Image: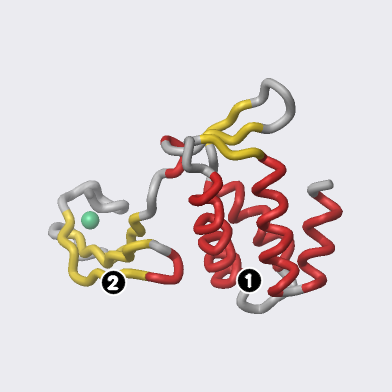
Amino acid sequence: MVCIHCGSETSVINSRPQKRLNQIWRRRRCNACGAVFTTEETAQYSAAWIVRGRPGSLQPFSRDKLFISIHKSIQHRPSALDDAGALTETVIKKLRVQAREGTVQATTITQIVQVALNRFDKAASSHYEVYHR
Ligand SMILES: [Zn+2]
């Protein structure tokens, strides 16, 4: 990967698995300008899972969309970013069972998020319900 500031080659100077988020975090330093920045390696679910919504609607699964919808519901919490990341992974773990054939119903995702949020934060769960009825 090239430097985000000058476009020169970079080297990995540190790397850490983030088990809770199922990601690998890497610290890179530019060989030319010395700038340091972080990259994250995550699975690309959009190529693996298709979401079935309203009749006839098929869309690639988006981890970002899931993350944003969860984050919106828990943004009142001081640790919202971390919590939304962990909750997103919890939901994805449960979806793995549902998405064996490569497709998953949008309503199934909504239900799983609802259950996860309800255990975590009742206010967040009600907020989510209002937006995903
Ligand atoms: Zn650079």
Instruction: Classify residue 61 as left or right of residue 42.
Output: right
Q: Position of residue 103 (x, y in %)?
A: 54, 35
Q: Residue furthest bottom?
A: 78
**Of residues 15 and 112, the one drawn nearer to the viewer in this rendering:** 112
Front-most of 122 and 26?
A: 122
Q: Position of residue 127 (x, y in %)?
A: 82, 61
Residue at image x 59%, y 71%? Answer: 83
Vertical arrangement, residue 89 with respect to residue 65, above or below = below
Residue visible at 37% across and 70% down in the picture: 18
Q: Which residue is mark 1?
A: 80
Q: Earlier in the sequence, mark 2 or mark 1?
A: 2
Image point (22%, 49%), residue name = 1
What secondary structure is marked by label 2? strand
Pointers 2 and 1 in contact (CB under 8 A)? no
Name which quarter of the figure residue 114 lies in.
Answer: bottom right
Q: Give the side of residue 34 with respect to residue 39, left or right.
A: left
Where is residue 72 shown, x and y percent of the image? 71, 59
Left or right of 8? Residue 18 is right
Give the quarter of the image for residue 91: bottom right
Q: Is residue 52 left or right of residue 46?
A: right
Tell me the amino acid under the disc marked 1. Answer: Ala
Query: How many discs mark residues in the rendered view?
Result: 2
Instruction: Confirm if mark 2 falls within 8 A of ligand 1.
Output: no
Q: Is residue 53 above or below residue 115?
A: above
Vertical comparison of 7 with 56: above or below: below
What separation in Å lies between label 2 and label 1 (alpha carbons)?
Answer: 22 Å
Q: Which residue is mark 2?
A: 16
Ligand 1 appears in which quadrant? bottom left
Front residue of 72/128: it is 128
Bin the neighbour count of mark 1 within 10 Å (Cα to Cα): few under 14, some 14-19, many 20 and up: some
Crowd tier of the residue under label 2, counting other residues whose Cα lies within 10 Å: few below 14, some 14–19, many 20 or above: few
